[in-house]
Structures are given as structure tokens and as C-alpha cells.
Amino acid sequence: MSVPASTAPQGQKDFMTRLSEWCLRYVPDSMVFVLALSVVVFFMAWGLTPSGPLKIVDHWLQGFWALLTFAMQMCVLMITGYVVADSKPVKAILRKIAQMPQTPVQAIIMFTAIVSVLWWIHWGIGMMAGIMLGRQIAVFQKGKGLHYTALVACAYTATVACNGPSMAAPLLMATPGHFMEKAIGVIPLSYTVFDPRLLVMNLILICTVPIIMALLLPKKNVVEIDDQLAASFVDVEEPAEDRSKLTPAQRWDRSPWLMTIIGLAGLYWAIKFFVTKGITNLDLNTLNFTFLIIGMLLHRTPLAFLESVKRATGTVYGVIIQFPFYAGIFGMINYSGLAKVIAGWFIAISTAQTYPWIVFVYSAILNFFVPSGGSKYVIEAPYIIPAAQQLGANIHMVINAYTNGDLVTNLLQPFWALPILGAFKVTFRDILPFSMIVFVWSFIIISGAYLLFMH
């Protein structure tokens, strides 16, 4: 399914189509990036530091297994978000919400705003809930003139506002034992994602992006979801199971008692944590534990829970195999002295006031070619953080700027959009005309915030 040429000016359509086709044709899989980046960093360390080639290989191996804990934490983060959104109670709530809007404009504004907030709370939930809610809205709005690819674009453009408590960089810095702890200590989320200035900027994006998406809705040549695709989005009720034929083992698999006991114990601990310490003291382990427990309680039985986990594990294979290579790159940068060299480059072009914005732009450009989220932070932190320290820049805002850079150029390349595109059966070029305009708006808002207030 694609949008007719008449839905956008021809020149604009041609440019966006070419950009999308370029991404899909020339931007390879993330595994290719990490291997290529390993080679580039090796030669940079060899040419710019006193370390010889064999010593750099030693540095590579020295870092290779240093981030296994972080890799496991990121896998659990992705899985728990999926599992919560994949539960029957959440799906039932989303179905009810999908029936609320009466017009396409109402549907677009409501959908984008809700998904933006969910992306901010937990990006895994935001992605999965966006898919599930969007598919339901497409079905319920059929016949009312809702442009289908505009709806899909909303599910993805909402990511630009998700610099919240589930983002890898600030969460990692808030977790004791992280790889930069000796240099900067542990930084609570109250100094990063819960900084009032960042919250205001996110609120502006959450309020304005839905309006922009509503204004971009085509008035003519509207292409709704087709009948066959809409039929595939309708949930089919599973037949009731004859429990009299189950074995004792199968009964235990379907029993809610153990899940309820463990879940309530975990829920008690999580509530106590948030009451006594507050959400601003959240770290990666606590967030993962909280959503793991919520997922257990929502699915109720071990069988339902594990089936959802099985579906979720397909999203983490890249993290499992690629994180050691990113850790190896970290080893070459950190132990060879290359981090000091690159930090010097940043210091030469920055002041304490402009540095967070420069990190934002740098991270945005690099993310276009290395769209790897938290794993890329492992590469950048060894030089962007020391540079901030030498300049006297606000390290907390530098961490936020890194994340915002990642988020804004996600709108221009298809890496993180692939699960959404697959679920809705569209191509990246279908949503790019919408996400491009949101990119321009978001870049202006975020740049203004960092240059004027967040430094």
C-alpha cells in the first residue's frame, strides 16, 4: 500500500521517496555497521595513538566482554515492555480506546498523543501499544476517511518525544556499577530525564506533534485500509479449552496461583521503592523488575507469560550478538588513548554553553548511520563525557542531548521502524513524507531548547 502522488507536492514526494529508497538500498543491517565501525576505530587508534596493532587487539579483547550485564539489562528492558503491551488486559483497554474517536482528525490526535506518552514511559510499551492500538483504530475508522499511512506514521513519529525513564543512556548512568562510574559517579534520573527543562521540551513535542500530524492528513485521494488487511487485524476469539483432558503438568502451566503469589510479592517491593525513594531514583534494574512483575500479573499464568516472552525474544537477537562488539570498540577507544584524542576535537569547537547542542547534532548525524540506541552510547561516552568535564559543560544535559540526537534522526531512517512497518504492512517510503516534516519541526524545537535553556 502506498500514498497516491497527489497527496503531496510532486517535488517533495520525489525527494522523500528518493531519500527513503536510498536508506533502504544503501543502509545495511546494524551488524554490518558494528563490524565496519570496529575496523574504522582500529585504524584510528593505530594512527592517532602510540598503541601498535597487536596492542589494540588486546584492548579490543579487554573490552569485549565488559558489558554483558548491560546487554542483559537491555534485553530484559525490551522483552518486559513487549510482554506488558502483549497482555490481554492491555489489549482490551486499547480496543476500547480505539472506539472513542469519531472522526479521522480526532483519531490522529488521540492516537499520536497516547502513543507519545507511552513511548516516554517505556519505549517497548510505546512501540507495541502503538502497533496494537493503531491496528484497532484503522479497523474502527474504516469508512470514515482515515488515511491509513498517516495513521502508521503517527505510531513512529511519536518516538521523538520518548526521552524518558526507559532511555538507555540516562538509565545506565543511574545504575550503580556502570562502566563510567569512576569518571562521573552515579547520576540519578532527577538530573537527566526528570530535569524540568527536558520535561517541558518533551511536553511541547507531545502537544504539537499530534497537531502537526492532523494538519498533514490528506483532504483528497484518501487511501483507507483495504478490506483484506482490516480483516487480518480483527482479533479472533480462542475456543475455550477442555480442562478435564489436561494432565497435572498442564494444569500447573495454566494455574495463576504461583504467578499471583510471586507477582504480588514483587509488586509490594516495587510500590515500597517508589513510595520511599521516588521515581527519580529509578535505575535500570528497578525499571526492569517493575515491568517484569507487571507482565507476570497481567498474563496471570506461566503458559501465557512464557508464550508472550517467546514472541518478544525475536526483538533482542541483535542486542545479544552485537553488544560484545560494541564493548570491544569501547575497549579500543578507552584503553588506547583514542578517547582523549577525540575529546580534544570536541573541546576545540565547543564552549560550555554550546557543547550539549553540539553533542545533540553529532549524535543525530552518527545515529543516521549507526542506529543502535544504547549500544552507541558505549562508544561515544568515553570521549563526550571527558570533553564535557574539561569544558565545564553540564554533563546531565550532555546525556540528554545524546538521547535526543538519537531520537530525532530515527525519523529519517527505517531501522527502528521495521517492527511497525511489518505489523502494518507498509514501506518506509509510505510514512517518510510525514516523519520528515516532524523531523524538521522537532529539530527546531530541540535545538532551540539546548541553545537557549538546556546548557
Image: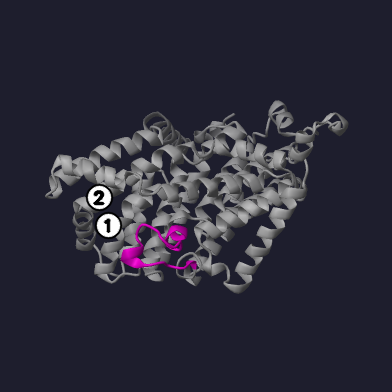
Q: Amino acid at mark 2?
A: Ile
Q: Residue at x 39, y 61 (%)?
A: 399
Q: Residue at x 40, y 37 (%)?
A: 30
Q: Residues within 10 Å of mark 2 (few under 14, many from 20)?
A: many
Tell me if I can see residue 145 in this picture: no
Q: Which residue is mark 2?
A: 333
* Count of marks overlaid on the render: 2
**Could you tell whether 323 is left or right of 263 in the image?**
left
| Residue located farthest toward the top when viewing the structure as drawn | 228
Task: Specify the label residue 125 is tagged with.
Answer: none
Residue 7 on image: x %, y %? 56, 37
The answer to whether residue 266 is above or below residue 74 is below
Magenta span includes 173: yes
Location of the C terminus by quadrant is bottom left
In front here: 238 or 10? Answer: 238
Task: Specify the label residue 383 is tagged with.
Answer: 1
Mark 1 and mark 2 in contact (Cβ < 8 Å)? Answer: yes
Residue 424 on image: x %, y %? 61, 34
Specify start and end residues of the magenta stretch as a single range.
170-189
Q: Nearer the viewer, mark 2 or mark 1?
A: 2
